[in-house]
Image (tube, rainbow, N blue to C red):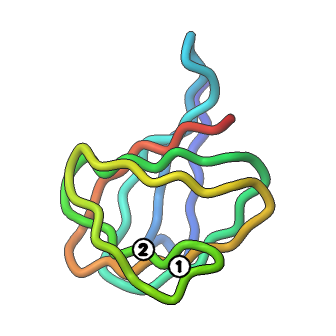
Amino acid sequence: MLKTNEYFEGKVKSIALNNHLGNSTIGVMDIGEYEFGTSTIEHMTVISGALIVKLPDTTEWKTYNPNETFIVAANQKFQLKVKEQTAYLCRYE
């Protein structure tokens, strides 16, 4: 059974799945600014649109475009700016 998640008053939505690659979510983010926390290592890949990301322990923002991935360690917080509706894949370790 697929599980759906909704965050930030419906501005971020995802569907969780589990397959031979492990646990993942595929989701979309509306325009806005968000902060997420991790409980495991997360591999975030942009599918469509772009994510402007400030990773833990950094002061710089970096833009990730389609097919680009960033990794966030477990038990960390990271910030995102979304300037257009964006789709992503998040794989959990």
Corner quadrant of residue 16 = top right
Specify whether 47 is left or right of 33: left
Question: x, y percentage for residue 41?
Answer: 68, 46
Q: Nearer the viewer, residue 57 or 33?
A: 57
Which circle marks residue 79 in the picture?
1
The amino acid pointed to by label 2 is: Val
Query: Could you give the CA–CA distance between mark 2 and mark 1, rounded to whole angstroms?
Result: 6 Å
| 19 is higher (above) or lower (below) than 9 | above
Question: x, y percentage for residue 45?
Answer: 37, 47
The answer to whether mark 2 and mark 1 are in CB contact below 8 A is yes
Q: Residue at x 76, y 54 (%)?
A: 74
The amino acid pointed to by label 1 is: Gln
Q: Residues within 10 Å of mark 2 (few under 14, many from 20)?
A: many
Q: Residue at x 57, y 68 (%)?
A: 7
Q: Residues within 10 Å of mark 1 (few under 14, many from 20)?
A: some
Question: x, y percentage for residue 49?
Answer: 19, 61
Quadrant that contains the N terminus = top right
| 67 is higher (above) or lower (below) than 32 | above
Q: Which residue is mark 2?
A: 53
Specify whether 72 is left or right of 80: right
Q: Residue at x 56, y 28 (%)?
A: 17
Q: Secondary structure at mark 2?
A: strand
Specify whether 16 is left or right of 27: right
In terms of sequence position, does the residue under pointer 2 or pointer 1 come before the other?
A: 2
Question: x, y percentage for residue 78?
Answer: 59, 73
